[in-house]
Amino acid sequence: MTNPIKSVLLVEDDEDDYLLTSDYLQQVSTYQFDIQWTDSSVEALELLKKNKHDICLLDYQLGSINGLSVLKQAINAGCTIPIIMLTGQSDNQLDNDALDAGAVDYVVKSELNTTRFHRAIRYALSRKEIENERLERIKAETRSRSKDKFVAHLSHELRTPLTSILGYTELLLFNKENSHIHAELSTILDNGKHLLGLLNNVLDLSKIAADKLELNYTHIALDNFIIDLYALMSVTAQDKGISLKINAKTPLPLEINADAIRLRQVFINLIHNAIKFTDKGSVTVDIWLDRSNNKHTLHFTITDTGIGIPDHLLETIFKPFEQVEDIVSRNEEGAGLGLAICCELLKQMGGTIAVESTENVGSKFIIALDLGDISHTTIAPLSFNRINSHPTTENFPQITGHVLIVDDLKDIRNLIGFICRSFGLKTSFAVNGEHAITKILEAQEQDIPFNSILMDIHMPVLDGKRTILKLREMGITTQIIAVTAATMKGVHQELKSLGFNDVVAKPVDKHALYQSLTQSLANNNNTMLHKHRFNQPINSASNTTEKASSPSKHFLIIEDDKDAAQVTALLLNNLNIEASIAHSAAEATTLLTQNEELPNHHYDQILLDINLPDANGLVLSKQLRILSPSSKITIISGNAISQDVLIEFSIDQALLKPINLTMLKQIT
Ligand code: ADP
């Protein structure tokens, strides 16, 4: 290996001394030196100011000029090159003066052929290298911090107008009077959602590129995970008239350790693509566990009978941006980021992805996920047979009642909510057991208890089993139906013995759910059954029930974007919640201090934008806590806020822009 080359500025007015010093320098074994010689103090000063050399050897006596004054002037002018003073004789005073003036060392010329000189050079250079590295690190950190800040800001700025676009469109779609422009409004909504999807993809990629993607590992119940995925994707498959099948080819671990949200993102992308590019036939997901080589690897293949992928596209399919031209020529929407993100996410979770495809025959995406140590997990046969039958799409006689749907997965909540509303029911949502208990107690207090509750079993914070025990202990007798993917023998019996009135299997079959709900509502006094066929648009049916009474709650919205504030207020009105708006921290403070004089007035919740013109939302939240101690505070931002930050600022919850009706329903 060759030694690194270092540039030396040698400031010496005696040519013999220059030759001698150069010679000694060449004997330093760890470096090669590129020497620039000058005998002029003026030129030396100019060169030192440029900070281009790695080291400088500066003669103490330069004709009539004292080397010390060159040293002092250079350092005053911002020179950071390590400078070693050279002198003819040893002198303690000179030595100290040179070091005081900023030299890194002081060497007597007679020592030039000794190890003392070599050591001085090596020390000076390595100190400089460490300093340079530190400087580079600080610069890189600052660059990355400002990029992070920029991306966070951009995300916030893009999500804020999307709140207005999606929110207003949702509101217009909600209104029966707009049925003649339903198609146009749906197009705006679909395109808005598509834009949001792209934004999320670009932000994901920028996080991955900056190595800032944080994975949140949890224990995932594999059957629940797969069945929830199936429930979601089967709706799209059915719409296209193709079958979606899931097969477990070997016994599988009941639990795996991975980031559930990211793993779902990968599967949704792959299954969504498979359905999108298949016009007839099927999409099949095969799952098996490989236990060879002392490792446990979970394999998934997603096989479709679709259009296939041309060879030239296969090469770049997992690389971001590179396939744009091909995608455009194939007349497809999308930026070609989805698979690149899937590939990166899997890599970070210890997995791999590959693809095989034949044009006009179909494609197969192959995933392998290293499960690590799964010795604590039972490996058992999991059957997904029952999900391979075709769910029905017929209408049902209308039933009336208010159902609380408790599930940690937003998509599943929405899906079950959609089905319930198609039965004629009014729906509310909770994201875990604890949230459900709060909502159930609130409803009881207001004397409008839920008529029935649909509850998932596997949930964070408080799971379904612990929730039912608590609720029954509190004396809540509402009909509660467990919704579970668990297929093991005895599970239904166990759930019923804990206090559930019925059990419905996931993925939810409309018939089974309808039957169970009808039974549960019949057992409930507040419920009416209507024996007429379903013939009204779902939205307008639920709309009328939501708007029945006068406003029960009052929220304060603090948001500087006027459109976003206005649409959030309208969405809240739609949920029968009164809303006041403040466009800045100052306006909010004025509103809240005025309210102190009106002792009966109180905001149930404050929705607080994180970026205000006159304050940071997080900091402002502390003041709001004091001004309005009983209001729940929800921070609204364009970037996910970590749980630690929420705890630090005592903020109850966070919402990610764009805000929509479903999100607001969940927090009210
Ligand atoms: P985007 O983010 O645009 O949805 P993806 O990265 O998910 O893109 O997919 C990139 C491209 O790969 C698609 O536009 C399509 O051309 C091709 N592709 C992906 N999956 C399939 C499939 N199952 N069958 C055919 N083509 C596919």
Image: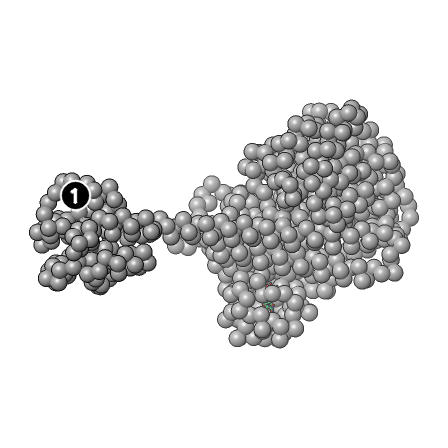
Q: Quadrant of the rendered structure where residue 608 is? A: top right
- Report x, y in % for residue 104: 23, 47
Question: Total marks drawn?
Answer: 1
In this view, 584 is above or below 110: above
Left or right placement of residue 146 versus residue 185 in this view: left
Q: Is residue 16 visible?
A: yes
- Report x, y in % for residue 153: 59, 50
Q: How is the image coloured?
A: one colour
Quarter of the figure with the N terminus = bottom left
- Report x, y in % for residue 277: 64, 68
Name the residue at 74% across, 55% down. Answer: 165
Determine which residue is flagged by label 1.
94
In this view, 197 is above or below 460: below
**SS assignment at label 1:** helix
Left or right placement of residue 311 versus residue 512 in this view: left
Name the residue at 77% across, 25% down. Answer: 597
In this view, 611 is above or below 441: below
Question: What kind of residue is marked 1?
Answer: Leu
Q: Could you say which is closer to the camera, residue 538 or residue 614?
A: 614
